[in-house]
Amino acid sequence: MNKDYEHMLFYFAYKTFIGAADEIIEQYGMQRQHHRFLFFICKKPGITVKELLTVLEISKQGSQSTLKVLKEKALITERYAPQDKRLKELYPTEKGIALIDKLNKAQRNLFEKTFNDAGDNWYAVMEVLAGKRPGFSLINEEEV
């Protein structure tokens, strides 16, 4: 087996996993970064902007436009922290929670179907997910 096979499997499996949500989020005029922000804001309501930046490992500058879009679309709200008015806390709205539930459900359904088809062997699961990407068969046929 190719020494890079696991890397290739993971890459294509990840593309399938994120693709399940990307297709949905794009229908709302947003991209993957909006999904990531909304996911963690829903996971920890009241997360400060600073904490969110730490979780996502990005700079403040890189967050401003994404947070602006989420606020404009009424998916999140921003409030000053009661204990320190210099800190801004982020909360999902009902609309934001509904969207993240929809995105999470798409990814959960993908996992459930994949585990039903492949069992719980890591290679089998990754191969089912990777096999959904056209590039996997193109690259993989050269390696087998």
Image (cartoon, grey):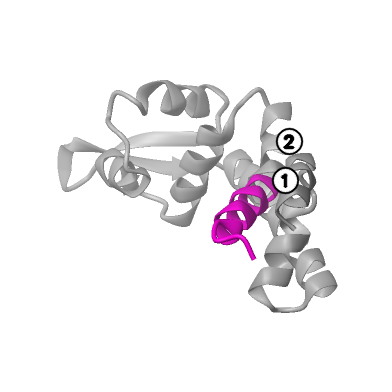
**Is 117 located above or below residue 97 in the figure?**
below
Residue 41: percent from left, percent from top: 44, 46
**In the image shown, does 97 or 123 lie closer to the viewer?**
123
* Quarter of the image with the N terminus in it: bottom right
The percent coordinates of residue 39 (x first, y second) are 52, 48
- Say which residue label 1 marks: 20
Q: Residue at x 71, y 44 (%)?
A: 139
State the residue at coordinates (42%, 20%).
65
Q: How far apart, in angstroms, are the residues tagged by discs 1 and 2?
A: 6 Å
Q: Check the image and report above or below for 46 versus 74.
A: below
Give, as a three-letter code, the residue at label 1: Ala
How would you classify the magenta stretch by its main secondary structure? helix
Instruction: Indicate the quadrant containing the C terminus: top left, top right, bottom left or bottom right.
Output: bottom right
**Secondary structure beneath disc 1?**
helix
Q: Residue at x 72, y 53 (%)?
A: 130
- Please report the bounds of the magenta region as a residue range: 1-16
Which amino acid type is shown beneath numbered disc 2?
Answer: Glu
Q: Residue at x 22, y 45 (%)?
A: 82
Query: Is 36 included in the stretch rendered in magenta?
Result: no
Within 10 Å of disc 1 (Cα), the crowding (few <14, some 14-19, many 20+) is: some
Crowdedness of circle 2 by 10 Å Cα count: few (<14), some, many (20+)?
Answer: some
* Residue 38 vs residue 124, the one in the foreground: 124
Q: Label 2: which residue? A: 23
The reply to whether discs 1 and 2 touch (Cβ–Cβ < 8 Å) is yes
- The answer to whether 43 appears left or right of 16 in the picture is left
Q: Is residue 3 left or right of residue 53?
A: right
